[in-house]
């Protein structure tokens, strides 16, 4: 910002209605991010020193420093010691779209499921798929299972009694298929403040689970037998949801930074959607960098595609602050954002949600009304009060601190007892750790050995499609105490080396 006019532009941005309610450093960070995305601060532009900008805005220098730190973490700013802070040169190329497209993927063939036992072809395929098994008890090393023993049940019960008293018989009737308005309002507020989204309560659809959201996406956006793109490796439940809706899943490779967007541009399958987990790629834990997020959005906008953003556990980010969601960066309204309370609160709640583009809300609400009507009103209204009274954010903060310590305990235990067997992929957040088996170790054999010692060891290779599969495990740690992590890892090691 080299002129008073540009400084005035930043000051005007700080007063935008959608930034009100944020901390001052967040407002500065969001305002600068918007100017960079719009090209007002182009590639290579040097930002003012924190002291200079703080003086111009009349704020503390630490406030500007915190804003710059988050911009750097999100990839919007490059900081050079002794030189200053710059907008990266790569921002411009990504905003203009990728110039080089390299590989072309061919969609795999599809084998027809044989009908039998009186089932339809679809029914037989669902039966043969084996379904999805959710963990019903706390045990090592269950993936995606949160800590439930410390959940504030007393607070929840008190709020539920208040709801019953205030709403009386109304909560015993059918509810709005889109979701209770108080809860939709709280979800929208949370997403805008905490995840950098741009969404109104009218865009929120309350559902029972992430898998229900993905099933609806496949039903409404993909014709039977048509392709849908998905990260490889990727979430097993998503693949099952898509296949149960008769979509054909086409894998798109990932690397240490997440989905390879160049492969999206090269794809010729005719798919209308891509399923991604940009905050913590499942199962590798990679965080999609800004350049690829922008390229993903650009690909969807130019080609009329939909982005299915599964933000399943982004609240649990331990190395720095969470990155902003793709939905908040997507000015083209091509992103369907999917969230769940099953990871942040407890899985038995059976409640998730979507933030939909305006044009899709009516169709998705109609489809949900056919599928199962609505989520129980008493749970929705209790959750709305739980969020509105500040209990939700407090619980998430407590779990974030707890899980960060458990991640370190899990990594330390792996190093102590399993270091000769696997190499862990250290995640920046999440609730599980992917571990790659070292040469000479068989995934199938280690799983059998673990089962013989009453340890359920989630395999990694089943999350891959195609010929190339990494052998290893996916070890969940969130639901285990540090002592339980230590004991279970030692027990596993003894079962494998005996």
Image (cartoon, rainbow, N blue to C red):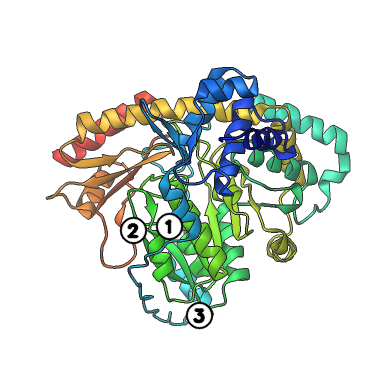
Real-space CA distance between mark 3 and mark 1, rounded to the nearest whole angstrom: 21 Å
Q: In this view, does 469 lie to the left or right of 80?
A: left
In the rendered view, would you say 382 is above or below 202?
Answer: above
In the rendered view, would you say 61 is above or below 252?
Answer: above
Q: Earlier in the sequence, mark 2 or mark 3?
A: 3
* Residue tagged 3: 121
Q: Where is residue 495 in the image (x, y as percent from the top left)?
A: 20, 39
Marks 2,1: beta carbons within 8 A: yes
Q: Quadrant of residue 466?
A: bottom left
* Residue at the limit of the structure toward the top, as seen here: 60
* Residue tagged 1: 236
Identify which residue is drawn at 53% across, 19% down: 62
Identify which residue is drawn at 14% across, 39% down: 497
* Residue at the limit of the structure toward the front, as seen here: 3
Q: Residues within 10 Å of mark 1 (few under 14, many from 20)?
A: some
Q: Position of residue 361 (x, y in %)?
A: 72, 60
Real-space CA distance between mark 2 and mark 1, rounded to the nearest whole angstrom: 8 Å
Q: Can residue 204 be seen in this view?
A: yes
Q: Earlier in the sequence, mark 2 or mark 1?
A: 1
Q: Earlier in the sequence, mark 3 or mark 1?
A: 3
Real-space CA distance between mark 2 and mark 3, rounded to the nearest whole angstrom: 24 Å
């Amino acid at each position: 910002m080299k002129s008073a006019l540009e400084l005035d532009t930043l000051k005007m941005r700080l007063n935008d209605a959608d930034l009100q309610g944020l901390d001052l450093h967040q407002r500065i960070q969001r305002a600068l991010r918007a100017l960079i995305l719009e090209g007002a601060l182009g590639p290579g532009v040097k930002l003012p020193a924190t002291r200079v900008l703080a003086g111009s805005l009349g704020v503390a220098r630490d406030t500007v420093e915190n804003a710059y730190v988050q911009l750097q973490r999100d990839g919007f700013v490059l900081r050079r010691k002794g030189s200053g802070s710059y907008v990266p040169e790569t921002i411009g190329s990504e905003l203009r779209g990728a110039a080089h497209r390299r590989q072309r993927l061919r969609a795999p063939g599809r084998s027809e499921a044989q009908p039998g036992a009186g089932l339809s072809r679809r029914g037989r395929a669902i039966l043969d798929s084996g379904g999805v098994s959710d963990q019903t008890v706390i045990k090592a090393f269950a993936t995606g299972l949160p800590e439930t023993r410390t959940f504030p049940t007393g607070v929840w019960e008190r709020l539920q009694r208040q709801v019953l008293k205030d709403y009386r018989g109304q909560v015993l009737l059918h509810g709005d298929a889109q979701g209770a308005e108080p809860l939709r309002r709280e979800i929208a507020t949370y997403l805008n403040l905490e995840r950098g989204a741009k969404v109104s309560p009218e865009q929120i659809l309350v559902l029972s689970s992430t898998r229900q959201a993905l099933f609806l996406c496949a039903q409404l956006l993909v014709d039977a037998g048509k392709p849908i793109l998905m990260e490889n490796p990727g979430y097993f439940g998503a693949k099952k949801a898509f296949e149960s809706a008769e979509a054909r899943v086409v894998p798109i490779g990932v690397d240490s930074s997440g989905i390879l967007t160049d492969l999206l541009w090269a794809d010729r399958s005719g798919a209308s959607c891509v399923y991604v987990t940009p905050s913590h790629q499942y199962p590798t834990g990679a965080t999609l960098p800004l350049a690829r997020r922008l390229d993903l959005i650009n690909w969807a906008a130019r080609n009329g595609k939909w982005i299915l953003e599964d933000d399943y556990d982004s609240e649990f980010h331990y190395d720095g602050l969470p990155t902003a969601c793709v939905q908040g960066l997507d000015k083209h309204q091509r992103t369907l954002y999917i969230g769940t309370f099953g990871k942040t609160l407890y899985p038995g709640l059976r409640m998730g949600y979507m933030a939909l583009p305006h044009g899709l809300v009516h169709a998705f609400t109609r489809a949900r009304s056919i599928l199962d009507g609505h989520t129980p009103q008493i749970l929705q209204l209790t959750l709305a009060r739980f969020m509105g009274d500040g209990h939700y954010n407090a619980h998430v903060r407590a779990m974030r601190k707890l899980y960060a310590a458990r991640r370190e305990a899990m990594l330390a235990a792996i190093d102590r007892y399993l270091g000769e067997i696997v190499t862990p992929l250290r995640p920046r957040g999440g609730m599980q750790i992917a571990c790659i088996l070292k040469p000479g170790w068989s995934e199938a054999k280690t799983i059998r050995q673990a089962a013989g010692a009453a340890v359920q060891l989630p395999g990694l290779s089943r999350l891959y499609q195609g010929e190339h599969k990494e052998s290893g495990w996916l070890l969940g740690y969130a639901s285990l105490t540090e002592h339980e992590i230590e004991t279970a890892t030692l027990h596993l090691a003894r079962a494998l080396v005996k």
